[in-house]
Image (cartoon, rainbow, N blue to C red):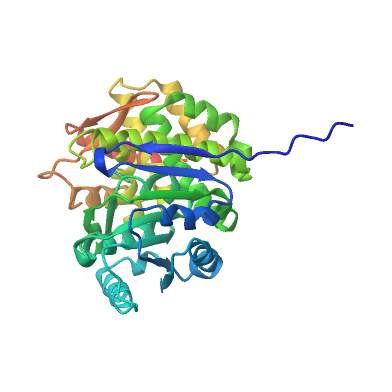
Amino acid sequence: MKPKEPLVPLERTVAVDLGRRSYGVRVGPGLLGAMGDAVAALPGVTGAAIVTDSNVGPLYGQRVSDALAAAGVQAALIEFPAGEASKNLSTVAGVLDALLAITPAVDRATVVVALGGGVVGDLAGFVAAIALRGMRFYQCPTSLLADVDASVGGKTGVDHQAGKNLIGAFHQPAGVMIDVETLKTLPRRELIGGLAECVKHAVIRDASLLDYIEDRAEDILACLGDVMTELIARNVAIKAQVVADDEREAGQRAHLNYGHTVGHAIEAQAGYGELSHGQAVALGMVAANRLAVGRGLLDEQSAQRIERLLNKLELPTRRPGLDADKVWWIMQHDKKALAGRIRMVLPTKLGAAGIFDDTDEQALRDAIEYLGSP
Ligand code: GLY
């Protein structure tokens, strides 16, 4: 009998085209092991500092450190407590202290490797943006949310008492390495949360991605390797295109906020941690769709199709008992509200979106009430 061809797992590379700040995003299984060669290939590297958290460090810190050492790059490991509560300036100060205490001393040829989910990527990227007036950094995301959103596009920063992500800088990574095997250790709730951002990308940019997610929903929930590689690469390609068109969010990058205006308010109203970010964004997309249907932008069938898909992915589309008045109050007091106006991103059809500053107050309140309906 003829021996079977060895199975070659899928690997993809997506380019983020930003002139001299361009970089590549590699997606596939086992890529943490490729981090050594990737970092060593950056011009003039003198060493690395792996910044990670107390969840991801014990799982993957040594593997990345070994990969770097095998490529001749010595790396220090800096770990901070996992969780959104760490995403603040005092953790930044602690990480800077650790970074500047490394011997031999770090210089601008040292590379910061951000190993972890969104909090790690945002915080380590911000440290890299400000330490020594700017160090190179490599994103090594380990959560689906970070894979498809935060690791690409150069938004870095931390939270402030006055709101989330209010302190930060645009600082593009030198590269992004997405090892899909890390999703196997991701809590299911976080996997599902990341899927909300995948649906978001499909609705605002690519209706055929919606078909793909519908067709492969079971494989996605089972985290099948090749399917995850394909899913993540397609999402990264959308994000890369949006960022290449509008790096500093002067316009169309704001489409990525679809589902987030109402979503953030629901997240804040519930108390952070009660609902995952992805669950809140799913609810926010449902509310935005109600507005889009009301304005004649989106047909009812498409809105229902998105709700069915969210449910299939185990994401919520209703929140019985939702305090609509409170959500409304939070939205009006959001620091990002423009002179009291609430800016909404609405789908204009499946695969396209627009920005609307003229949302009718009653329509928005009705859309929030809809979420509380059975
Ligand atoms: N996560 C939204 C953006 O990168 O613009």
Q: Residue at x 54, y 36 (%)?
A: 230
State the residue in front, 132 or 42. Answer: 42
Residue at figure coordinates x 26%, y 63% from the top left: 108
* Screen quadrant of the N terminus: top right
- Please state the quadrant of the image where ligand 1 appears: top left
280 relative to 207, above or below: below
Answer left or right for 251 relative to 284: left
- Residue at x 20%, y 62% (from the top left corner): 162
Residue reaching furthest to the left: 339
How many numbered circles are shown? 0
Residue for point 60% across, 44% down: 221
Residue 280 lies left or right of residue 248; in this view the side is right
The spot of residue 9 in percent (x, y) is: 63, 40
Q: Is residue 315 visible?
A: no
Position above or below: 210 against 58: above
x and y percentages locating residue 285 in the rendered image:
38, 38
Q: Quadrant of residue 45?
A: bottom left
Q: Is residue 162 above or below residue 22?
A: below
Residue 158 location (% of width, % of height): 27, 62
Q: Nearer the viewer, residue 38 or 55?
A: 38
Specify whether residue 341 is in view. yes
Foreground residue among 269 and 219: 219
Residue 2 % position (x, y) = 85, 31
